[in-house]
Image (cartoon, rainbow, N blue to C red):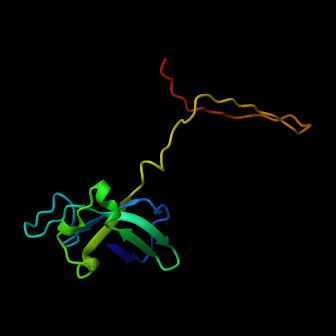
């Protein structure tokens, strides 16, 4: 199912390929430790974000595409779109596309001063990981 959701504002780091989660809140509380026994407020995988429109502040979530990542939209403890106002929607960055750290096998740097005036370098740094031997 393809679901468009409109917000007042979309987080600047939200992008296509992120995983959307939803949690039903009650009394401004949500999460695993909610004291209310009648409402399941545990976060669910909502789906895969397939479109982000920053002009209309709308994201499009594909609940079918998220089956491979564990989406259980059919078992959500809320009705769509009736409980939309009571949902807390958040996202997780794709671990395939948004990695950080060292990539590659070697690095070579060279610093040059093309000015005729003397220059001073205050700091330089490197992030490295010893490779397997």
Q: Please indicate whether residue 114 sits to the left or right of residue 36 in the image.
A: right
Asked whether 21 or 124 is in front, the reply is 21
Residue that sits furthest to the bottom in the current view: 82
Left or right: residue 68 versus residue 105 is: left
**Closer-to-camera residue (49/25):** 49
Compared to 13, does 99 lie above or below? above
Quarter of the image where one finds residue 123 = top right
Residue at image location 44% in from the left, 59% down from the top: 17
Q: Is residue 13 left or right of residue 110?
A: left
Give whichever of 113, 1 is nearer the camera: 1
Residue at point 48% right, 50% down? 97
Q: Position of residue 15 (x, y in %)?
A: 47, 62
Looking at the picture, does residue 65 appear above or below residue 133? below
Indicate the quadrant where residue 128 lies.
top right
Q: Position of residue 32 (x, y in %)?
A: 18, 58
Residue 110 on image: x %, y % = 75, 31
Which residue sits at x=48%, y=21%? 132
Farthest residue toward the left?
37
**Residue 3 percent coordinates (x, y):** 35, 75
Q: Residue at x 46, y 76 (%)?
A: 57
**Which residue appears farthest toward the right when viewing the image?**
116
Q: Nearer the viewer, residue 131 or 71?
A: 71
- Would you identify the image quadrant in which residue 1 lies? bottom left
């Amino acid at each position: 199912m393809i679901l468009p959701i409109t917000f007042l504002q979309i987080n600047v780091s939200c992008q296509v390929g992120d995983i959307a989660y939803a949690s039903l809140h009650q009394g401004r509380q949500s999460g695993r430790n909610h004291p209310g026994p009648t409402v399941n407020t545990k976060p669910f995988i909502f789906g895969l974000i397939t479109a982000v429109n920053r002009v209309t502040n709308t994201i499009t979530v594909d609940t079918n595409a998220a089956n491979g990542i564990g989406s259980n939209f059919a078992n959500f403890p809320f009705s769509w779109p009736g409980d939309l106002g009571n949902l807390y929607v958040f996202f997780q960055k794709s671990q395939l596309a948004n990695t950080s750290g060292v990539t590659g096998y070697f690095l070579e740097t060279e610093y040059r001063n093309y000015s005729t005036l003397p220059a001073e370098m205050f700091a330089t740094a490197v992030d490295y990981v010893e490779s397997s031997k």
